[in-house]
Amino acid sequence: MLLLLARFFVVRQATAAISLTLALAGLGLLTLRLAGLTLMLILGVYAAVWLAFYVVPLTTLVVEGLLRFLGELSQHLRELYQALTSPTFWRDLLLNWQLLPLMVFGGLLAAYSGTLLVALPIAVTVIYARAWLAGLATARARLGRPLAALVPVAVLLLGGGLLLLLNRQPQGKAFALLAQPPASPIEAQALLNRQDEIRAGLLNAYLAPQRYISAVGEVRHVRDLYAEAFNIPSDQAGRVQALYESVAQPLLYQPVEPIQPNAGWDNQALQREPAQAAELYESFFDRPLVEAGTPAVVARCVPPGT
């Protein structure tokens, strides 16, 4: 569900790495043998680690808020008593009685959802690990220990290798090839011989806002969240951000130009480099990228649902 939510509501256009991740999850769901259980364990642990980056600081902030509330409980009780003894409180309550069930059940639902969010990383890991251990025991009884141990190792190596292969982003090479105009006909012909590679790189940069949720070095909300939750310096929180970005790498765009650590939100790579890619495309191919006619570009230009 987490992968599907990210696919449909965050990443409008799936990259090869995202498609592979969803395919592996599908194989894991459809396969009841050891290979499928291994896939599900790997992806389950990956999702749990991803969520844990948010669960740890959010839980800390909630606990701090609860302790602060308990420390100020006497003041809150006095304010509640004053509200209950005020005539305007009951009058406003009668006028807006339809909001009372929403407030009560909404608060309970929020608390229940928060509990699920905190327990989800642990629960997912435990459930998938138990299923994998049961599948491993069955495979040992049927195939023997050596072959049963070989299956998870082969799945891990094959899946990891495919992910590394498909997660390569071509925009860096394309920008580098077009950094300087050709100085001779030979250099111009060399660029023309690599036009497919250049086109793929510029297209990936142009469609980055549809293919990725953010850029490497710009997931600053993680840094800010940890700095606030644990009251640590920004550089230490930046290390947590870098670790998070290494985990979420398939969903992050790799900027061509270095990211400034304290740059404002108006200087994001997902805003700057698509425009640069469009300029380079028109300069090299002598036609606007929008007029290239590829389905991916058309899907970006046409609003969803039209």
Image (cartoon, rainbow, N blue to C red):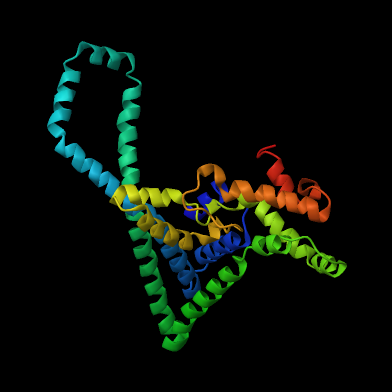
Tell me the quarter of the image containing the C terminus.
top right
Q: Identify which residue is drawn at 76% across, 53% down.
A: 281
Q: Nearer the viewer, residue 111 or 289?
A: 289
Q: Quarter-wise, where is residue 93 in the image?
A: top left
Q: Identify which residue is drawn at 35% across, 44% down.
A: 113
Percent from the top left, x then y, of residue 153?
48, 79
Q: Which residue is farthest front?
A: 183
Viewer can see residue 176? yes
Left or right position of 61 against 207: left
Q: Nearer the viewer, residue 128 or 184?
A: 184
Left or right position of 299 against 61: right
Query: On screen, 86 above or below 281?
Result: above
Percent from the top left, x then y, of residue 144?
43, 87
Q: Nearer the viewer, residue 33 or 175?
A: 175
Q: Identify which residue is drawn at 74% across, 60% down.
A: 178
Viewer can see residue 1? no
Query: On screen, 111 above or below 117?
Result: above
Percent from the top left, x then y, of residue 88?
24, 12
